[in-house]
Image: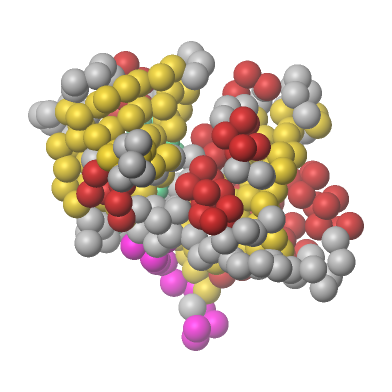
């Protein structure tokens, strides 16, 4: 059951001219969020912007005793709501509804977890990496961005024992090019008998390429899709994705309730 919370902004850290991490006091949401779930957030009261926007829960904040106190959002400024999130000040109140949606299915050893993140698609993987660590699952993060200046939070992932494979489009950090290239190479080099679960979040083109690559090597793949969401609760149908049903036909499913995490092999990507 999601919680409707008037969440106080407790911190706002700019990571770059476009990216920030917003910390919200929201104990009930923090205590119940599973990796891959999201919240619907709006910073300003009134009708402009009218609708809340969806954001993955990036981190769970905890007190010194380990009690969940809040959540953070990793946000990339692209329009009005994300600009308000970028400029938010401590003490402001955000209308925050969550946790929402279906989380990732978390594997157990000996299956390895290979997470594939493009840009702000890193957001759901911090909580997933923590959950994988708790289960002692060997994890790798393939993380691509336009430049090295847009690769964030590398040390927290390293501290969780996650192996990093970095790519940038300008070649400033890691391998030059798209993140799916090393994924393809490493899947090709891996024995078919060694189980891997691929998890992906990022721009739709990257998700489609990751899904295709996972399918090429017969590996299961869960993708977190980012459709425009009006309500986040199944009421508006703004977020539909064509999915292959049990009847062998494609049906439009609402990604806010059937997802955002969906089995890549069942999605029609064209
Ligand atoms: C489940 C889910 C989780 C998300 N998690 C995050 C996150 O952790 N961090 C983050 O920064 N963003 C995340 N997003 C995307 C985020 O919701 C949008 O960036 C946000 O709604 C934009 O709001 P805005 O008012 O700033 O921009 P708007 O003014 O609403 O839009 C600006 C432009 O971006 C386009 N756009 C808006 N939403 C999307 C979208 N979802 N996909 C592609 N294009 C879009 C619009 O068509 C428009 O052209 C997530 C989306 C979903 C569905
Ligand atoms: S966002 Fe309204 S139905 Fe999915």
Please provide percent x and percent y for residue 81: 30, 28
**Quarter location, residue 148:** top right
The magenta-colored residue range is: 246-260
In the displayed orientation, state which residue is furthest to the front.
65
Residue placed at 72% from the left, 43% from the top? 163
Residue placed at 16% from the left, 47% from the top? 4
Picture quarter with the N terminus: bottom left
**Quarter location, residue 84:** top left
Q: Is residue 258 magenta?
A: yes
Picture quarter with the C terminus: bottom right
Please provide percent x and percent y for residue 204: 56, 46
Please provide percent x and percent y for residue 18: 47, 19
In the displayed orientation, state which residue is furthest to the bottom.
247
Residue placed at 65% from the left, 37% from the top? 158
- Relative to 74, say whether 86 is above or below: above
**Quarter location, residue 86:** top left
Total numbered labels placed on residues in the image? 0
Ligand 1 found in image quarter: top left
Residue placed at 58% from the left, 27% from the top? 152
Q: Can residue 195 be seen at all in this image of the molecule? A: yes
Q: Is residue 269 left or right of residue 262?
A: right
Q: Can residue 48 be seen at all in this image of the molecule? A: no
Q: Is residue 159 left or right of residue 214?
A: left
Q: Is residue 12 left or right of residue 269?
A: left
- Relative to 129, say whether 218 is above or below: below
Please provide percent x and percent y for residue 83: 34, 21
Q: Is residue 165 magenta?
A: no
Q: Main secondary structure of the magenta part?
A: loop
């Amino acid at each position: 059951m999601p919680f409707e919370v008037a969440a106080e902004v407790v911190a706002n850290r700019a990571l770059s001219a476009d990216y920030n991490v917003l910390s919200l006091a929201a104990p009930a949401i923090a205590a119940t969020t599973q990796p891959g779930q999201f919240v619907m957030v709006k910073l300003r009261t009134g009708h402009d912007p009218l609708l809340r926007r969806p954001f993955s829960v990036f981190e769970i904040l905890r007190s010194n005793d380990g009690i969940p106190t809040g959540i953070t959002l990793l946000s990339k400024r692209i329009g009005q709501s994300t600009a308000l999130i970028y400029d938010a000040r401590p003490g402001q109140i955000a209308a925050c509804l969550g946790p929402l949606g279906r989380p990732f299915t978390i594997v157990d050893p000996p299956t390895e977890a290979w997470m594939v993140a493009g840009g702000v698609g890193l957001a759901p993987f911090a909580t997933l990496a923590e959950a994988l660590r708790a289960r002692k699952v060997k994890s790798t993060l393939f993380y691509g961005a336009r430049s090295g200046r847009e690769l964030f939070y590398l040390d927290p992932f390293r501290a969780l024992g996650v192996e990093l494979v970095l790519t940038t489009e300008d070649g400033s950090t890691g391998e030059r090019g798209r993140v799916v290239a090393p994924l393809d190479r490493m899947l090709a080099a891996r024995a078919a008998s060694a189980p891997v679960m691929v998890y992906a979040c990022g721009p739709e083109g990257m998700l489609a390429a990751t899904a295709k690559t996972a399918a090429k090597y017969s590996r299961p793949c869960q993708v977190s899709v980012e459709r425009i969401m009006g309500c986040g609760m199944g009421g508006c149908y703004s977020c539909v994705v064509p999915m292959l049903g049990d009847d062998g036909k494609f049906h439009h499913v609402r990604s806010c309730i059937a997802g955002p995490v969906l089995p890549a092999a069942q999605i029609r990507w064209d």
